[in-house]
Image (cartoon, rainbow, N blue to C red):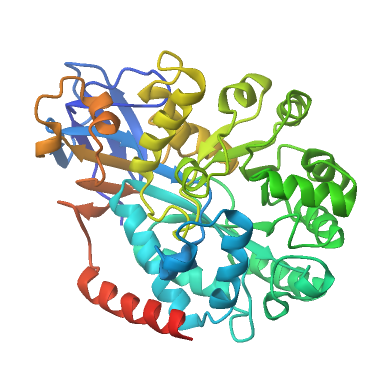
Amino acid sequence: MSAPRTWIKNPQAIFTANDQDARGGLVIADGVIVELLAAGQVPAQPCAQVFDASQHVVLPGLINTHHHFYQTLTRAWAPVVNQPLFPWLKTLYPVWARLTPQKLALACRVALAELLLSGCTTAADHHYLFPAGLEDAIDVQVEAVRELGMRAMLTRGSMTLGEADGGLPPQQTVQQGQVILDDSQRLIRQYHQRGAGAQIQIALAPCSPFSVTTEIMQASAEMAVREDVRLHTHLAETLDEEDFCLQRFGLRTVDYLDSVGWLGPRTWLAHGIHFNAEEIARLGAAGTGICHCPSSNMRLASGICPTLELEAAGAPIGLGVDGSASNDASNMILEARQALYLQRLRYGAEKITPELALGWATRGSAKLLGRSDIGELAVGKQADLALFKLDGLRFSGSHDPLSALLLCGADRADRVMVGGTWRVIDGQIEGLDVAALISAHRQAASSLIAG
């Protein structure tokens, strides 16, 4: 049975991410946008449902291109509050190694719910922890995504270079290469959906140069080509990582990426801070995407991503909240605000506009995930929408609605639609007992830290 034709009518403001005029709203049928209406226009056909959006700012559903859902269990943990990346990781790895399927399920539901409430409709998660008992971690994530009704790119991460071999992770978190490859193959065949409207997709994601061997990087690249899936990893996040690559491989980070067959349009990288001009040109020429994670980069004092140089060179830019132990939130509209402000420190106020930051969070992020069906409002695109009200005290006295979302600090959507179905109504997730989820999640977080 098809969904009723719906008119999202006369929004207070609308951002299409493509400069099309949609001041009269948009029409949705069967989960897809079928009309954009200029001011004063009415739908070409009658609509069974009309939603008055005159009090809402309408955006494409926001797209988060880098996260670690499991880290919602270790937010604001005192021993790592003031640590940079490498000691932060080494302190947290033993805690994360105690993850169980039940704790991961709660962590994923919390992360996804928080994202959804912030206007996010699609999320990429980088899960690379598979200690004994957690071998089916991605299956756990699939169930959580389906429960919340969102879209996800779930990346099958891996760590193969433990402390005993000169890496950072403890040995109990390291897996053998063939185990990783076999599970990756299984996940692709069992869950990966292709084409417009896909809900679940799988990518391959060895964790980082300091936690995996060159062999798993190369084998993952070969599998990605063979199975036509995407590749993801952390790269050039800190100067410590650069030093590690030079000492272990005799290569800078982009040279290393090239040496293992990853420099190309199939790849998107988390952070991408410490590149020189020649490396930026190479990344752009290859079409390799960069996920900017401003909150995490500020929290860990890692640096500032050179977004404008990368874009000018041809590298797509998207946004990600990163892990909830280095942000420590899962909020995409706030992440767009942080991107606006952090990038203004680098480039100045005139060059970094609210529209640019929102474009990174929507159309830019969609490019990173290799998707052309989401990330903008246009005929034929999926009906993924985020609607925000500007009726709170923080917005009083604001004049430009679109700018007010970021400048006044919007942090919660009033309504969110995924594929033509309302998932958030009046600021509440349909069918989710948030209070019960918080209670169970807090207990899981306490027991994980306690060991």
In this view of the protein, which residue sits in the foreground, 253 or 228?
253
Count of numbered tags:
0
In this view of the protein, which residue sits in the foreground, 376 or 334?
334
Q: Residue at x 17, y 26 (%)?
A: 12
In this view of the protein, which residue sits in the foreground, 32 or 424?
424
Query: Quick check: 218 left or right of 134?
Result: right
- Res 359 → quadrant: top left
Quarter of the N terminus within the rendering: bottom left
**Quick check: 40 above or below 7?**
above
Image x and y of residue 164, in percent: 81, 75
Image x and y of residue 197, in percent: 47, 48
Image x and y of residue 61, in percent: 37, 42
Q: Residue at x 74, y 71 (%)?
A: 180
In this view of the protein, which residue sits in the foreground, 154 or 235?
235
Image x and y of residue 334, in percent: 34, 42
- Res 43 → quadrant: top left
**Quick check: 240 above or below 447?**
above
Query: Quick check: 393 left or right of 56?
Result: left
Does any portion of residue 127 appear in the rendered image?
no
Q: Residue at x 47, y 65 (%)?
A: 71
**Quick check: 10 above or below 246?**
above
